[in-house]
Image (cartoon, rainbow, N blue to C red):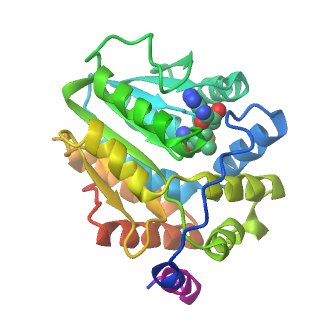
Amino acid sequence: MPSPAVLLVALREVITRQRAPRRTEPDLIMADPEQVAAYTRAGREDGVMAPVYHFHAAQVCDVIRPGDTVLDLACGPATQLALVARLNPDVRFIGVDLSEEMLARAREHIAEQQLDNIEFRHGSIDALDFLEAKSVDAVMSTMALHHLPDEETLSSTFNEISRVLKPDGGLYLVDFGHLKSPRSIEYFANQYADRQPDLFTEDYRNSLWAAFPKEAFQRGHARHLAERSRLYSTFIFPFMVAIKSPSRRADEQALRETFARLREQLPPHHRRDLKDLKTFFGLGGLSSPLL
Ligand SMILES: C[S@@+](CC[C@H](N)C(=O)[O-])C[C@H]1O[C@@H](n2cnc3c(N)ncnc32)[C@H](O)[C@@H]1O
């Protein structure tokens, strides 16, 4: 059962009529070394994002297959990417990001993890010029699309995905959805403030303000990606929005056991957050056989 505070946010989002307007990220590209370090730490050490990474890893693994070439759009410090790459040693990954600072963190991370199935490209996700049409087997992107400046660029990004992805390719894109009420944004921004650096709380608040409304995802999806995927959002209010292709995985038993083991290693509060995410997305229709 989600906490009473989350249920209160849900109620407020349902009854609020007017949506607070979107505010673009102050730094569209994450280039400030301190901000990059705070984001990287929150993912890797204290790990406030661990349940989120676990959830998305299970979704991504569901749409990729051994032998694939998979593109991660706006990979950031590669925490999510490295987790997926470790679980799929027979898959080749290409991480794309526009921040050299982030790519430096990403390279350090995969070197520490001794992963040899990831390469990185510096570039913008709405202009994937280095890739031929229908040249990748799957595309993933986690918690990054809100960095795009406007809905037009979101749509160009979906258009690029549609261009580079093979016809039967896998797809998993996920990001925050724009909340209606500033109080709801403030609630989520501060939810883990005592467990994370202030800079990360600030960064998270900016991300929630910059999130695109679900309707923007719907328009871009309908135009470019509807033939190969479905759009989902968390139940009651679209705190998160995801676009996912049908499952492409056949050999899920071993991976399912791996995910169960990883889940057991999470501390109880992270397991609870993961359960909430699974419940809210599950009621919105999004599931993974690996969770
Ligand atoms: C919040 S981080 C998300 C990183 C990662 N996907 C994750 O799940 O942790 C957003 C990333 O998007 C990158 N970014 C912003 N605009 C971009 C663009 N147009 N093309 C490529 N990367 C971009 C930023 O540099 C940053 O690394």
Residue 131 higher or lower than 136, as above or below: above
For the N terminus, the image quarter is bottom left
Question: Can I make out residue 62 in this image?
Answer: no
In the rendered view, does 40 fall on the left or right side of 141?
Answer: right
Rendered residue at 51%/52% (across/down)? 212
Residue 15 higher or lower than 194, as above or below: below
In the rendered view, does 258 fall on the left or right side of 22?
Answer: left
Q: Residue furthest front?
A: 18
In the rendered view, does 218 fall on the left or right side of 194?
Answer: left
Please tell me in which quadrant of the rendered image residue 112 appears: top right
Q: Residue 33 at what x, y percent from top left?
A: 82, 33
Foreground of the two, 155 or 167: 155
Rendered residue at 22%/46% (across/down)? 252
In magenta stretch: residue 37:
no
Total number of numbered labels? 0
Rendered residue at 26%/28% (across/down)? 66
Please tell me in which quadrant of the rendered image residue 269 appears: bottom right
Q: What is the span of residues highlighted in magenta in the rendered image?
A: 2-11
Q: Residue 5 at what x, y percent from top left?
A: 59, 85
Query: Magenta: predominant secondary structure element?
Result: helix
Q: Residue 56 at what x, y percent from top left?
A: 43, 50
Foreground of the two, 213 or 101: 213
In magenta stretch: residue 3:
yes
In the rendered view, does 86 fall on the left or right side of 179?
Answer: left
Q: Please state the quadrant of the image where ligand 1 appears.
A: top right
For the C terminus, the image quarter is bottom left
Q: Residue 144 at what x, y percent from top left?
A: 55, 42
Question: Can I make out residue 151 in this image?
Answer: yes
Rendered residue at 70%/59% (across/down)? 205
